[in-house]
Image (cartoon, rainbow, N blue to C red):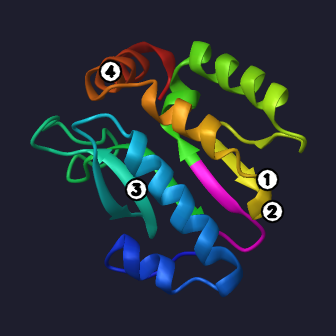
Amino acid sequence: MKHDAESPEQYIEMLPDGRKEAMKKLRQTICDHLPEGFEETMSYGMIGYVVPHSVYPKGYHSNPKLPLPFVSIASQKNFIVLYHSGIYADKYLLDWFTNEYTKSNLSRLDMGKSCIRFKKAEQIPYDLIASLISKISVNDWIRIYESAKNGNGL
């Protein structure tokens, strides 16, 4: 569900009570482990973490006016979702994450190309997400993105 929030705080405040605490904790986990250079913003109606134009002036290839996206989180109708572009663009990172998830979580992994869905807030593996977030620096993400964009189908 898309929100018209102007800030991450406003976005979370607009959520139903059953989702607020999980989203606050997920946001804090990301902020606490996000490598230097990424910036928190509102993007596509979600809380987003991007490479700002001051670091990557080219912006996002499909809309250069937008900063390069990295991670987004949202509360959707049936689940909380984490979109992580790195697991879409880097097979090593995807393999690492799926392996670690199966070792550390009792629920079945519900995942698309870049999205990880959590139907129940208590199933969110915050420690694993902290590790995932910290694995790619801004420079690593730009390199992975450029490589994928220029030959591997982003």
Q: How far apart are marks 4 and 3 (CA)?
A: 20 Å
Kind of residue at disc 3: Gly
Kind of residue at disc 4: Glu
Sequence-wise first label, 1 or 3? 3
Which residue is painted at 50% across and 23% down in the image? 153
Q: Distance between the residues labelled 2 and 3?
A: 21 Å
Q: Distance between the residues labelled 1 and 2?
A: 6 Å
Which percent across, then down, holds residue 39? 26, 49
Sequence-wise first label, 1 or 4? 1
Q: How busy is the neighbourhood of tag 1: few (under 14 within 10 Å), some, or many (20 plus)?
A: some
Q: How busy is the neighbourhood of tag 4: few (under 14 within 10 Å), some, or many (20 plus)?
A: some
Q: In this view, does 30 lie to the left or right of 120?
A: left
Which percent across, then down, holds residue 58? 17, 36
Name the foreground residue: 15 vs 83. Answer: 15
Residue identified by numbered label 2? 120
Residue identified by numbered label 3? 48
Q: How busy is the neighbourhood of tag 2: few (under 14 within 10 Å), some, or many (20 plus)?
A: some
Q: Given this view, does label 4 or label 3 mark the residue nearer the observer?
A: 3
Name the foreground residue: 45 vs 152. Answer: 45
Question: Residue 123 shows which numbered tag?
Answer: 1
Task: Answer above or below: position of 118 versus 69.
Answer: below
